[in-house]
């Protein structure tokens, strides 16, 4: 197998949560561009899913949209039901759906903490468990990519002036879960890795970047925020045979920010 063949995802079935916009849609596009034309996108709003499907359709992908709240008890199983009913397998799972809450730690509402953990950790694990148990273990393998964050590795720099303790803790849990599942499921041929994006302009980060965007740029060695194509290559790599001997790892895609603090 040459290097070009290693990166080829032709014929793979990919499931991306939070795939209707932002980082999830960017990753779904990247996987489709590398050949994973059977793309399942899960998110809450059908109108946003329809818009995302139109973009992937233009790239020649066959798209299944699943409008569901992943954080509900029935959400994970419903997503897997839909994908298996359509294609009978899941080769790639991208756990991207997430939420955040900004507040000083001493004033962080407990109900907001629980909301963040419910989607970012509990629902992520529930879906991953369903995919592994019903698809990847029976078929003898697969690639799971969890979207963490550079804030998983430490607190926010004090000079930035914002608090996201719940979000940070949830992403740290995602990194550890990535390692734990990689260690446990390697025997099934399942690889589990994570990406840790830095700051990308998304709907979730818009308010924060309006406030501290200049400071973010100053703290980033490459002097730029993440762009519309900056996760595609890293995601495709970790989901492809080019990374077939890589599991349990977390790759920062942050313009060097995590190297400088």
Image (tube, rainbow, N blue to C red):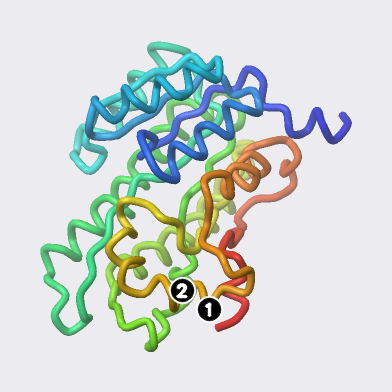
Residue 196: % across, % down: 52, 60
Along the line of sight, which residue is nearer the eye, 163 or 248?
163
Residue 164: % across, % down: 29, 72
Question: Residue 86's mark?
Answer: none
Disc 1 is placed on an element classified as loop
Query: Most extreme residue toward the right, as rendered?
Result: 2
Image position of 2 with respect to 197: above or below: above
Tell me, yes or no, whether the two marked residues, 2 and 1, touch with CB atoms within 8 Å.
yes
Q: Determine which residue is flagged by label 1.
A: 219
Image position of 253 with respect to 48: above or below: below
**What is the CA distance from the residue labelled 2 to the residue labelled 1?**
5 Å
For the point 50% across and 17% down, the residue is 58
Q: Determine which residue is flagged by label 2.
A: 216
- On-image quarter of the N terminus: top right
Disc 2 is placed on an element classified as helix
Q: Quadrant location of residue 244?
A: top right
């Amino acid at each position: 197998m040459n290097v070009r063949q290693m990166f080829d995802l032709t014929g793979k079935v990919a499931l991306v949560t939070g795939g209707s916009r932002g980082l999830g849609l960017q990753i779904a596009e990247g996987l489709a561009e590398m050949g994973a034309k059977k793309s399942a996108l899960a998110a809450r709003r059908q109108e946003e899913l329809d818009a995302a499907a139109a973009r992937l359709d233009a790239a020649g992908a066959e798209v299944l949209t699943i409008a569901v709240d992943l954080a509900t008890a029935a959400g994970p199983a419903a997503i897997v039901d839909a994908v298996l009913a359509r294609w009978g397998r899941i080769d790639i799972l991208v756990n991207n759906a997430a939420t955040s809450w900004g507040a000083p730690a001493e004033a962080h509402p407990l109900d907001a903490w629980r909301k963040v953990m419910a989607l970012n950790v509990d629902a992520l694990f529930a879906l991953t468990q369903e995919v592994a148990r019903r698809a990847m273990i029976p078929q003898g393998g697969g690639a799971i990519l969890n979207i963490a964050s550079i804030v998983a590795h430490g607190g926010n720099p004090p000079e930035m002036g914002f608090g996201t303790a719940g979000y940070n803790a949830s992403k740290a849990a995602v990194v550890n879960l990535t390692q734990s599942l990689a260690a446990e499921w390697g025997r099934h041929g399942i690889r589990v890795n994570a990406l840790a994006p830095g700051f990308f302009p998304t709907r979730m980060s818009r308010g924060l970047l309006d406030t501290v965007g200049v400071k973010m740029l100053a703290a980033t060695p490459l002097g730029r925020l993440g762009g519309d194509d900056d996760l595609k290559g890293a995601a495709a790599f970790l989901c492809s045979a080019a990374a077939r001997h890589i599991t349990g790892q977390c790759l920062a895609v942050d313009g060097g920010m995590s190297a400088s603090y």
